[in-house]
Amino acid sequence: MQVRGAAMNQQDSGFDYPRYRKLLAEAVDEPKRLALIKLLIDERAREKLAAQETQRRSDIIHSLLAPRPPSRSSAA
């Protein structure tokens, strides 16, 4: 089965399939299903924030290490 162009059985790094399968199996009523949905949303949001922070730090480091053009002096 395909989801967004990727096979569903393809292991996604950082996605704990056994844990989520267990939680899904335990979600037998509406409150538990809603709790599972909230958990998935919260964890995805945390992952996105962490990725944004990593990218921000990478951008800062890149800007510090990037070669700068030689400065022009006003004396000629």
Image (cartoon, grey):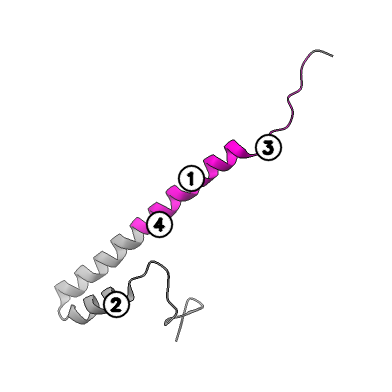
Please indicate whether residue 24 sits to the left or right of residue 55 in the image.
Answer: left
Please indicate whether residue 46 sits to the left or right of residue 27 in the image.
Answer: right
Question: Which of the marked residues, 2 or 1, is nearer the chain's N terminus?
Answer: 2
Which of the labelled discs sits on residue 48, or is there none?
4
Q: Secondary structure at mark 3?
A: loop
Name above or below for residue 47 compared with residue 22. Answer: above
Q: Amino acid at mark 4?
A: Lys
The nearer-to-camera label among 4 and 2 is 2
Residue drawn at x 54%, y 44% is: 59
Q: Magenta span has 21?
A: no
Q: Considering the image in quadrants, where does the N terminus appear?
A: bottom left
Say which of 29 and 25 sits in front: 25
Question: Which of the marked residues, 1 or 3, is nearer the chain's N terminus?
Answer: 1
Residue drawn at x 21%, y 70% is: 34
Q: CA distance from mark 2 to mark 1?
A: 32 Å
Question: Which of the marked residues, 3 or 4, is nearer the chain's N terminus?
Answer: 4
Magenta range: 46-74
Q: CA distance from mark 1 to mark 3?
A: 19 Å
Check disc 1 and report the residue beneath it: 56
Q: Secondary structure at mark 1?
A: helix
Check disc 2 and report the residue beneath it: 18
Q: Are marks 3 and 4 in contact (CB under 8 Å)?
A: no
Check disc 3 and report the residue beneath it: 67
Q: Residues within 10 Å of mark 4 (few under 14, many from 20)?
A: few
